Amino acid sequence: MIKRILYFFRKSWTLFANLSMQKKLVIIFIFLITLPITYVSYSSYRANSNSVLSSTTASAGLMADNAMDKVDQYIADLKRYTILPLYNKDVQKFLDQQGTDWDKNAAINMFLMYLANTKEEISAVYMTDHYGTIFYYNKPELNELYPYERLGEWQEQTRKAGVAPVLEGTHPVRANGLEQRQVFTVMRSIQSISTLQDIGMIVIDVDIRLFDGIIQPLNTVTHGDTLIVDEHGKVVFNNDPEQLGKDLTGSPLLTGASNGLRGNFRLNIGGEPYIAVYSVSENTGWKTLVTIPLKELLAPMKQSRDAMMIMTLSILAFALLVAIIISYALTKPLKRTVQLMKQVQRGKLDVQVSVKYNDEIGMLGSHFNRMIGRIQDLLQEVYETEKSKQKADMLALQNQINPHFIYNTLESIRMLAELNDDDRVAELTYLLGLLLRYSITRSDEIVTVERELAHVENYLQLLQIRFPGKIGYRILVPETYYPLPIIKLIFQPIVENAIFHGLEKQTESGNITIEAWNERDDVIFSIHDNGVGMDEETLASLNMSLKDGKTDKFGIGLRNVNERVRLHYGENSGLTVGSEPGEGTTVVLRISGLYKGDDQQ
């Protein structure tokens, strides 16, 4: 215990020591002056508050019990009404009669009208006969009801309850087209007094405006908010319509109201302290919960509290004034130095501390000025070095051979070969010229899939001339993909990689197959070779290299294509490689959003 106390003091001292000097002085003044005043004020306010809380809580509890008794009495009356069909001979007879006629409609409607008018809050009464026909009577403001939408639910609930009444908490019902009405419902199955078999059921909907007259006086007196919650934890009534039917199971409000039939507890709602008073009905299991904000309960104490706060704030203001005057003179030079440091941190180096005194703060400013001068010298050296490097790069670029000069030279060689009837050299030179001409333009230029495949075919034909009988190819891309736009030099690096890493390493001839299909808006290109393939470890390393781009083990060809595709078409695009030793390798290129179906044509 002693070690913990010592640790706490050491930790507190560390926090205090890390504050600025001005804050330290202010804290000391405030602590010495306000500690006794705060203690006296708090003790007085706490004693009076406890007295107010106790009396208000007791009063709210009595009112909650009274409100719950009124609700219980109302629901008990409704349950008694559901028994009345047992004692009406006409209702008993017509409910067991199949079909409808004027007598049946008149008798049942008269009975339902009587029930609907026994209480003002009853919005509608329904009755079903033995054959599922629904009769109902509704109040004038309800022009149209839809009881058949609820028939299955009624039948299920009454079947489970047997002969007992069923109480259903607040729920919305459809009326007058798309209008929603909030009601709670009491229902019961109707038995034949002669056969004791179910011959129908009776359902009573009650508008929840019933609770306004019961709950509003409670809210007015307590300045709080009242909830009525059913036995399943769902809100039956609240002034906020959005809360109706909400499941509060597991909420702090409902958890606190689980000890006994009545009581109170404290909780936080929206960061504000509240006291909750609850009462539980023994008949229905419903709970009435009143949440009262503590600031409302403690309103009578506000005047004395405000007077005490004014006195305390006056003393604090005086203490702060003294502390600020003293600390300002001591810390002003240090604050100026800190501000200049922040400007340097943002890149502004043309600053300097004005040193007036030879104390510790003045020494700090002098060292700061020397440090800024050294940083400026180093930055100038870096600038001169970078400038020299850019000049060297420009000279190297100027000394490069112009690609157009190479292309024009190849054209001249081809013309000389044709003049000398050397068709093989002419074709070879012609294909090489086409490849070079296609490659010397910008690599991010947009071309069609058709042009890109033509470039690959020229490249393969050139290799067939160089290596007769060694390489075959098939381009099986449907012509519907030919007009699609695509960035340049996508397929040729993949084909080149397949030839020199897959086909060239085997003695027999090999084939390259290029296919395409679409998956929704994505276009998939497959470049397959039947070369030597690769083992699982090499394949995994290659795919990892394509994914993170952190290794140069496999060269830059595939990785360059993958990065360009992902930069241009998004992260869902790119290359994946599949391979098995001796079975060849397949490179799959996915381009997201490239295919637009018929709109593309």
Image (spheres, rainbow, N blue to C red):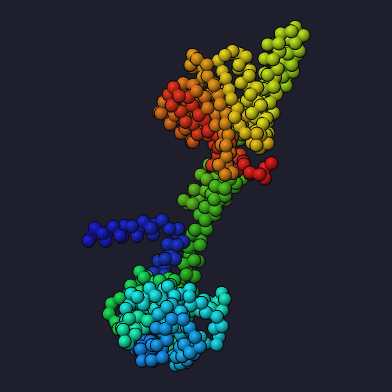
As rendered, which of 252 and 179 lies closer to the eye? 179
| Relative side of 363 to 439, left or right | left
Q: Residue 491, position in %: x, y? A: 59, 29
The mark total stands at 0
Residue at the (54%, 50%) spot, across then down: 342
Residue at the (45%, 75%) spot, across then down: 150
As rendered, which of 409 and 550 lies closer to the eye? 409
Quadrant for the C terminus in the image: top right
Q: Quadrant of residue 33?
A: bottom left
| Relative side of 540 to 395, left or right | left
Residue at the (33%, 57%) spot, across then down: 11
Q: Residue furthest top?
A: 420
Q: Residue 34, position in %: x, y? A: 39, 73
As rendered, which of 27 and 285 lies closer to the eye? 285
Is residue 61 in view from this perspective?
no
Q: Residue 264, position in %: x, y? A: 32, 80
Quadrant for the N terminus in the image: bottom left
Q: Quadrant of residue 218?
A: bottom left
The image shows residue 590, relative to residue 147, as above or below, that is: above
Residue at the (39%, 69%) spot, across then down: 31
| Relative side of 196 to 115, left or right | left
The image shows residue 15, relative to residue 58, as above or below, that is: above
Q: Residue 317, position in %: x, y? A: 48, 73
Is residue 489 in view from this perspective?
yes
Q: Quadrant of residue 492?
A: top right
Q: Residue furthest left?
A: 1
